Image (cartoon, rainbow, N blue to C red):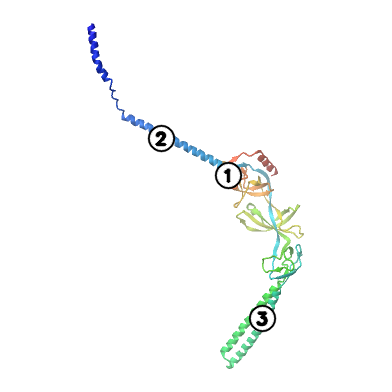
Amino acid sequence: MSNESHSNSGQAQKKMPHEGHDTQHAPEAKPIAKGLAVTALVIVLIVFAALATFGILSRIHRTNVLAKSTQELAAPVVIALAPKQGAPTDTFVLPGNVTAYTDAPIYARTSGYLTKWYHDIGSHVKKGELLAEIATPELDQQLAQAEADLGTAEANAKNAKAQAQRYQGLVATNAVSQQDTENFTNQATATASSVKSAQANVERLKQLQSFEKIYAPFDGVVTGRSIDTGQLIDTGAARELFHMQSLNTLRVYTNVPQMYSANLKPGTKIDMSFPERPSQMFQGTLVRTSHAIDPTSRTLLVEIDVDNRKGELLPGSLAQVHFKAPSAQTFVVPVSAIIFRREGTQVGVLGADKTAHVVPVTIGQDDGRTVQIVNGLKAGDLVIQDPPDSLIEGEKVNPQSPSQEQLNGQQGQGGKG
């Protein structure tokens, strides 16, 4: 039994070298399947595409956020408040310009030296009353020369006429030629025309000479005198000598908003007040309108005549014209909220989508701090306070909450309205 074991171990030892030789070579790897490689490549591409898409979307999102933030920051900051409701009114007051019924500057029609003036500013004069005299020695000599030329022309014409008549009598007996007769006849006609020309020149110079005396063109008051004795006077409108105005009746011009134009009829009595006479009310008569709406201001120009025979009112002053109108609800806003542009009077209103809307309005009373809006606003509108000059229709704005001081100001406006 020991021999068998020894024999078996010997055999095992003989086989061991072959087994050691086999362990020196790694077994061959199995080839990777083609489908598995394609799947792995697709997965890698999907991962890269997802990462690229995520990066692009993130960049787009950041760009949109930046653009939105920039737009919000670029939008003007505004404060919008609801206008205070004013008391319903059936009257409105507009400013009017007071002018003289007749207003005329007076100029010289002839040149010379002023020898004397008779009326100063404030003088009441009648039509045809002498205001001043001008010395015109050169014009006087020109007139004398023209009259002498007229005498010469008349003498020549008389002689030519006699010659023509003589030849016309002799040509019948063939004592003179027909040609000579026609020459003398034509000469008589030409000299007669020369007489008319000389007469016209004399009349022209006489007319100029008549302007040596300056007369009042109408009944009125001398409101200006810009000359003095001895001054050289030139012909034309380069220098005004006197200024006259007729003050017995004054004209008051004012521009009425279009919405009230249908109620303006000639003959209507209109009340007016003046700052220099605060306790007194004057009454005028609406005499005419322009019959055309001004496309810039959307107003109608009207003229009101006021009796001023007592001389209480002065041309050039400002009148407060009181018009009557149908009763309407009004709103009160600060003067700073009004926008004055070529399109007319407007205000900015805040829309629900944070956009500004520019709406035309009609103003009523204006006390210098607040303005009464009689047309253009409705209940619930938010009026932009102190709108920027660049505000346009549909512009995005950034509304802010008003301060307590601004709210107190609004309450004051409401109480006043």
Mark 1 in CB contact with mark 3 (< 8 angstroms): no
Name the residue tied to disc 1: 356
Question: Which element type, helix, strand or loop, lies under badge 3?
Answer: helix
Identify the mark nearer the N-term, 2 or 1.
2
Image quadrant occupied by the N terminus: top left
The residue under label 1 is which amino acid type?
A: Ala
> Residue 290: percent from the left, percent from the top?
64, 58
Question: Which element type, helix, strand or loop, lies under badge 1?
Answer: strand
Q: Residue at x 60, y 92 (%)?
A: 170
Name the residue tied to disc 2: 49
Identify the mark nearer the N-term, 2 or 3.
2
Question: Can see residue 353?
Answer: no
Q: Residue at x 68, y 79 (%)?
A: 145
In three-dimensional space, the C-alpha distance between marks 2 and 3, rounded to whole angstroms, equals 115 Å
Which of labels 1 and 3 is toward the front? 3
Name the residue tied to disc 3: 149
Instruction: Classify 10 Å Cα crowding around label 3: few (below 14), some (14-19), many (20 and above).
Output: some
